[in-house]
Amino acid sequence: MHDHEALPMVPIRSARGVWLQAHDGKRYLDAISSWWVNLFGHAHPRLDAALREQIGTLEHVLLAGFTHTPAIELAERLVALAPNGLTRVQYADNGSSAVEIALKLAFHHCRNRGDAQRTQFIALAGGYHGETLGALSVTDIPLYRETYAPLLLTPLTAASPDASLAEPGESARDVAVRAADALDTLLAEHGASVCALIVEPLVQCAAGMRMHDPEYLRRARAACDRHGVVLIADEIAVGFGRTGTLFACEQAGISPDLMCLSKGLSGGYLPLSAVLATEAIYQSFYDEYTKLRAFLHSHSYTGNALGCRVALEVLNIFRDEPVLARNHALAAHLADAIAPLARHPQVRNLRQTGMIAAFDIVDAHGHAFDWRERRGLHVYRHGLERGVVLRPLGHTIYFMPPYCITPDEIDFMVGVAREGIELAIA
Ligand SMILES: *Cc1c(COP(=O)(O)O)cnc(C)c1O
């Protein structure tokens, strides 16, 4: 709160494409997709038009005993696009709520199949799944979690497959195998009391864009199967083309039992989320009322018609335009633009997965800066001065731009970050 005495909030009047425009007329390139939600740019003509059409037709109706075309069509389209085996959709209205639903579904599914002793979750070191108490319980970022720790569930923590934890001579895949072995050990000891493992596939975003080899997901899938554990893929940040494929799980060739979607789901327009589930999970709840096996969970705005309609238009854009192919070209340009940073003496762990790129800044001796030094704040401040929204996570600087960014805009964004680094390490 103190920071804002020197850094007042920037009031944004309008936005178009990658550019935000402030009330004083200054423009800012949205290099972080407004916290990872925006896909195709701000004020996208097709998304605007879809929303306009839906307003005036149906804005919202309860999704209990009633339904509507956008909710039905969106569910059908998501099931068709999702990894094999995910056949059912439960809506909610934000990412944290989707995670709450997935955790409750996993536990309740085990209970429905006669496994009520499975009351524990396994979460990864450095994982982030949201701010509500259940989602925060499976989050392992002390800054967000520690204050509330006395209120939270205590999951088992499995080693992160983060490739930057490689020992000398180890490849990203080696780290993934090592982490999967540790997961096996954890499951061998506690497997019978565990209902679910929750992971962020390929990129642990909030932890500082920590990336891992897909081999981890293949091995985690197999380990969950061996131990009767539900695998929850939290694709809230990595879904919808961010990592190079529509869903990150595709790169490992696996299907989770539950998949959480939000953020890009509605193109950055409206709060909406969905949890996709397997038929086996769905069927374990399917029974007569008096058996009390049903999943009693709803939010007032579950499956909001405006959100569903704009999400459908997002999928239409993926259908009609070569979004992933264009992203591959942009990601290649981004890779070239950041490549020189690999030679910078105070840059470490330069990494990229699709449209997400990141690196860490270190002190002159190659050691991590103390978090209290807040060197990233210099990069943030410099970005604001030069008109780029860069929002480092501690001493990790990252880029996650909307997919409509141009090669020139990528060069500008990376150039401003490079200037920022020099100020930050000075
Ligand atoms: C942002 C995020 C969430 C939480 O979503 P909200 O809509 O902010 O509640 C959960 N998991 C991951 C991986 C996220 O990045």
Image: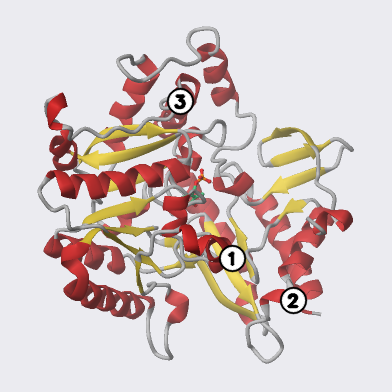
* Place of residue 380 in the rendered image (x, y in percent of width and height, measured from the top left): 75, 60
Q: Residue at x 36, y 69 (%)?
A: 213
Task: Describe residue 350's horizontal placement relative to residue 193 as left or right.
Answer: right
Q: Which of pointers 2 and 3 lies earlier in the amino acid sequence?
A: 3
Mark number displayed over residue 143: 1
Q: Give the Cα separation between the discs numbered 3 and 1.
A: 30 Å
Camera-side residue of 191 and 150: 150
Q: Residue at x 36, y 20 (%)?
A: 63
Q: Which residue is mark 2?
A: 373
Q: Badges 2 and 3: C-beta atoms under 8 Å apart?
A: no
Q: Look at label 2 and name its amino acid.
A: Glu
| Ligand 1 within 8 angstroms of badge 3 C-beta | no
* Place of residue 227 in the rendered image (x, y in percent of width and height, measured from the top left): 14, 64
Name the residue at the top extreme: 56
- Is residue 170 visible in the rendered image? The answer is yes
Q: Badges 3 and 1: C-beta atoms under 8 Å apart?
A: no
Q: Which of pointers 3 and 1 lies earlier in the amino acid sequence?
A: 1
Q: Residue at x 80, y 60 (%)?
A: 381
Tell me where residue 10 sits by quadrant: top right
Q: Which residue is mark 3?
A: 300
- Is residue 353 visible in the rendered image? The answer is no
Helix, strand or loop for disc 3 = loop
Q: Give the Cα separation between the discs numbered 2 and 3.
A: 43 Å
**Above or below: residue 239 compared with residue 157:** above
Helix, strand or loop for disc 2 = helix
